[in-house]
């Protein structure tokens, strides 16, 4: 890490003011000046920006090195744009179009903003925690010899104080402590205000303790230099000041100098007279607003003093809306200055009317060279990085052999075979799991490739020669990152490892495993990972009521619907081991392809008889979402449509019903998600005059328009019932709509109507409806 150079505090102060102005102006312009055709409030957060302009000026124009990566609190997005505007990497057009179509995004977005954004933010708390996992990934790459010391950086999170209520932050620091995480700066904009109001008093003391107990250094930046000096000189005043509640303090900041005077007079009477005589109201206000997070000297000093790799929490006291007319007001979160207030601010900041977008407007001739030099010297990346970081060749993945297999067992076998065969892909795979490594069948892979830790951790059981199927020693070369049971951490880990190409120019192939029902536990983090186009393979197993005796708490129902609605994540649900092998190969290709996406495999522990294949023709269809496992007759009047682990029931029913229903087809669905996407994409392209037919349309048009479809899935029936909408065919949907319970497969399939009898009844009903 590079040492910061000595810097001109006055120039940084000017940049702080420029950022405060430009962010306020960008938001004002979008709300009050830009044409607004639909009358919707455009919005933006002038107060949240003003609160941390000094912190961001000190970082971007002083402390950050070229390899450092920052997650900016969502509501400070306009400040980040203003910084890049000053750096020359953001256009005025984009600022003028803030929150408009194609303009600067409301909240920093890796994928949509044109400036380099290291981490997207928006859902509070997640942007904070991902920096910790990114730091872990950096350590992983360094340990594996894929990153030079000189290319390493620090991970910075700029945090709103209310974000600290998000539990995912604490899950992350607990995990970080286990992995001895380092090179983190988390900087809290401690304005003691959330969205609704002022926040609960004295919480910073709690945060101190929590972070310290996880190995963090906590640096409190409570007062600026001026206020520190005065309070040191007047201990009684300090004592009183520190008893003020967050609400009282905020109210005084809002009311200003005269209110401070009145309050001090009331509190101390004649004892305060001499002190008060030294300050006019403006000076009094300036004194009491001199908090650590607004004092450039304090910030620069604190950052310069924290140059080691100890994870550090800075609690920087600030005022929400600092320098704006609604500073400190509890309702200011979404507050916007009106044109009159804006004009007052413009005058106060020496900005001439008509010159509002001028980068250094209002900066005097004497100061200008120093400010320009600082901007020039800033070491942060100005350009968005290319996503071309070299592709690797993905080998063909053969299917594991065996007449009876479960997809979960096949998954473990495929990884083991990959590991044994070796090669670039195997070396770049990193697996991770929230305490379900063994039960999701990663065990054999981990035995081969080892656990990752920066220091050596002995496998005591192996050393003591205690028999165990599982090696559990860790070192620098390991390729499995062990996580505690916190699914949110799993998805943040996958997000960070899935961005390793973007962040560190070295693509990893992250695979995360968990039980299918617990996807819901980390859902927002999963969405967050996809939102910023992180690439990974998620393997969820076991799934569905097919889990049998484990019971309803572990039997997943709705993840296929979740996947159907989740952009950036491709759902595959194989029935057979050869399908799984093809899907894993495809998932690795998609991780590597700049136009690709992440994949989600929903697997099962049910061992089923594998099908005989005459040739490879199924493969293309399986990767596209479905194929005919039993071809239908020409314009057949019925088909069974089934997905995943219940395929044996579908096949048996097909055998039984075929005698009465000649031409009955059996469609094996491997991805409702892909079928649906293909369907809507083909429709949209037809509106543009192309004559495209989607895969699902081609498949279903083999049947009669009046055909009946019996759909079957160990999941919410809506996963497949929509297929009736494609060509208007009738559907009898079978699936799981109630919570599961314990039982044998036969019991459960009968009770939840996934068995042959249910298929027969459903077929009879739908065919009767058709008038047969
Ligand atoms: C997960 C999530 N829940 C709720 C919100 C809505 N929200 C946006 S900002 C905010 C409070 C912000 O307060 P703080 O973090 O202190 O930021 P400040 O604006 O005070 O700097 C809330 C509740 C959100 N963005 N994300
Ligand atoms: Mg706040």
Image: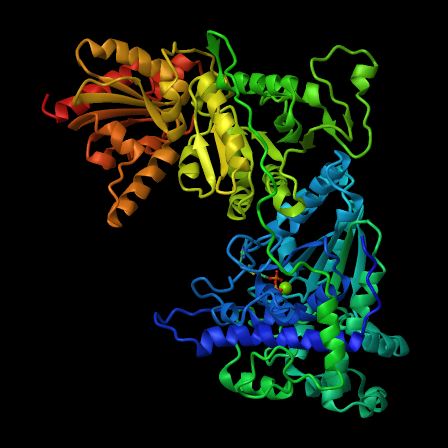
Q: Quadrant of the C terminus?
A: top left
Q: Which residue is depicted at the point 51% across and 10% down?
A: 401
Q: Which residue is depicted at the point 53% across and 45% down?
A: 533
State the image coordinates of residue 20 (x, y, percent, origin top left): 63, 74
**Which sits in the foreground, 655 or 292?**
655
Q: Which residue is depicted at the point 24% across and 28% down?
A: 700
Q: Is residue 753 left or right of residue 440?
A: left
Choose top left, top right, bottom left or bottom right for residue 280. Answer: bottom right
Residue 266 in sight in this render: no
Choose top left, top right, bottom left or bottom right for residue 318. Answer: bottom right
**Tag count in the figure?**
0
Residue 748 in sight in this render: yes
Q: Is residue 229 left or right of residue 711?
A: right
Judging from the image, the colouring scheme is: rainbow
Q: Is residue 392 above or below residue 643?
A: below
Q: Is residue 212 left or right of residue 507?
A: right
Q: Is residue 485 left or right of residue 196?
A: right
Residue occupying the far top of the picture: 403
Choose top left, top right, bottom left or bottom right for residue 763. Answer: top left
Q: Is residue 318 above or below residue 525?
A: below
State the image coordinates of residue 110 (x, y, percent, origin top left): 56, 53
Residue occupying the far left of the picture: 771
**Which sits in the foreground, 256 or 139?**
139
State the image coordinates of residue 264 (x, y, percent, origin top left): 76, 84
State the image coordinates of residue 568 (x, y, percent, origin top left): 47, 42
- Ligand 2's image quarter is bottom right
Q: Which residue is depicted at the point 58% across and 63% down?
A: 77
Residue occupying the far right of the picture: 233
């Amino acid at each position: 890490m590079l040492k910061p150079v000595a810097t001109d505090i006055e120039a940084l102060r000017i940049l702080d003011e420029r950022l405060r102005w430009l962010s306020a102006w960008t938001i004002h312009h979008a709300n009050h000046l830009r044409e607004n055709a639909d009358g919707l409030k455009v919005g933006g957060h002038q107060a949240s920006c003003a609160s941390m302009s000094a912190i961001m000026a000190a970082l971007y124009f002083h402390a950050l090195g070229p390899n450092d990566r920052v997650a900016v609190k969502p509501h400070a997005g306009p400040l980040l744009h203003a910084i890049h505007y000053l750096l020359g990497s953001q256009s005025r057009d984009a600022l003028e179009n803030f929150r408009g179509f194609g303009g600067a995004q409301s909240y920093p977005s890796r994928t949509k903003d044109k400036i380099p954004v290291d981490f997207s933010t928006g859902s509070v708390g997640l942007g904070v925690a991902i920096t910790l996992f990114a730091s872990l990934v950096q350590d992983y790459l360094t340990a594996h010899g894929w990153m030079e010391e000189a290319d390493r950086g620090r991970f910075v999170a700029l945090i709103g104080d209310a974000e600290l209520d998000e539990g995912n932050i604490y899950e992350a620091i607990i995990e970080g402590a286990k992995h001895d995480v380092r090179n983190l700066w988390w900087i809290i904009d401690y304005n003691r205000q959330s969205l609704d109001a002022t926040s609960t008093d004295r919480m910073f003391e709690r945060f101190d303790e929590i972070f310290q107990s996880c190995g963090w250094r906590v640096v409190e930046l409570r007062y600026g230099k001026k206020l520190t000096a005065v309070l040191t000189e007047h201990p009684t005043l300090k004592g009183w000041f520190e008893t003020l509640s967050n609400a009282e303090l905020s109210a005084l900041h809002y009311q200003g100098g005269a209110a401070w005077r009145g309050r001090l007079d009331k509190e101390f009477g004649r004892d305060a007279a001499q002190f008060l005589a030294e300050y006019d109201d403006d000076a009094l206000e300036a004194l009491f607003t001199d908090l650590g997070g607004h004092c450039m000297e304090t910030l620069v000093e604190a950052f310069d003093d924290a140059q080691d790799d100890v994870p550090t929490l800075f609690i920087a006291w600030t005022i929400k809306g600092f320098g704006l007319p609604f500073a400190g007001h509890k309702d200011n979160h979404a507050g916007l200055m009106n044109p009159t207030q804006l004009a007052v601010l413009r005058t106060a900041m020496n900005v001439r009317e008509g010159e509002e977008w001028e980068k250094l407007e209002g900066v005097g001739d004497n100061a200008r060279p120093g400010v320009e030099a600082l901007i020039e010297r800033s070491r942060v990346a100005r350009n968005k990085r290319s996503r071309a970081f070299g592709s690797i060749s993905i080998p063909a993945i053969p299917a594991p052999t065996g007449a009876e297999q479960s997809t979960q067992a096949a998954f473990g076998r495929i990884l083991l075979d990959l590991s044994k065969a070796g090669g670039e892909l195997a070396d770049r795979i990193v697996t991770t799991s929230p305490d379900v490594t063994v039960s999701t069948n990663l065990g054999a892979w981990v035995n081969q490739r080892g656990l990752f830790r920066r220091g050596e951790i002995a496998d005591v059981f192996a050393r003591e020669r205690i028999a165990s199927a599982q090696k559990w020693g860790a070192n620098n070369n390991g390729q499995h990152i062990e996580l505690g049971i916190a699914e949110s951490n799993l998805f943040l880990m996958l997000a960070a490892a899935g961005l390793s190409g973007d962040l560190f120019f070295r693509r990893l192939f992250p695979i995360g495993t968990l039980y299918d029902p617990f996807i819901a536990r980390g859902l927002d983090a999963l969405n967050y990972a996809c939102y910023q186009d992180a690439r990974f393979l998620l393997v969820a197993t076991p799934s569905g009521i097919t889990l049998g005796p484990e019971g309803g708490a572990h039997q997943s129902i709705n993840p296929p619907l979740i996947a159907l609605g989740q952009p950036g994540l491709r759902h595959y649900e194989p029935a057979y081991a050869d399908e799984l092998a093809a899907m894993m190969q495809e998932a690795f290709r998609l991780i590597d392809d700049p136009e690709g996406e992440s994949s989600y495999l929903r697997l099962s522990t049910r061992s089923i008889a594998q099908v005989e294949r005459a040739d490879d023709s199924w493969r293309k269809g399986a990767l596209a979402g479905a194929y005919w496992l039993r071809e239908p007759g020409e314009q057949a009047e019925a088909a069974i449509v089934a997905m995943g682990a219940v395929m044996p029931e579908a096949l048996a029913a097909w055998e039984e019903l075929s005698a009465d229903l000649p031409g009955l087809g059996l469609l094996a669905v491997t991805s409702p998600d892909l079928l649906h996407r293909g369907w809507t994409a083909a429709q949209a392209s037809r509106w543009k005059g192309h004559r495209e037919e989607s895969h699902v349309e081609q498949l279903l048009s083999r049947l009669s328009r009046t055909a009946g479809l019996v759909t079957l899935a160990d999941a919410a029936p809506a996963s497949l019932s929509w297929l009736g909408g494609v060509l208007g065919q009738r559907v009898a949907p079978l699936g799981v709509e109630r919570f599961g319970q314990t039982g044998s497969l036969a019991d459960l399939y009968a009770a939840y109507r996934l068995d042959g009898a249910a298929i027969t009844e459903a077929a009879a009903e739908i065919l009767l409806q058709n008038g047969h």
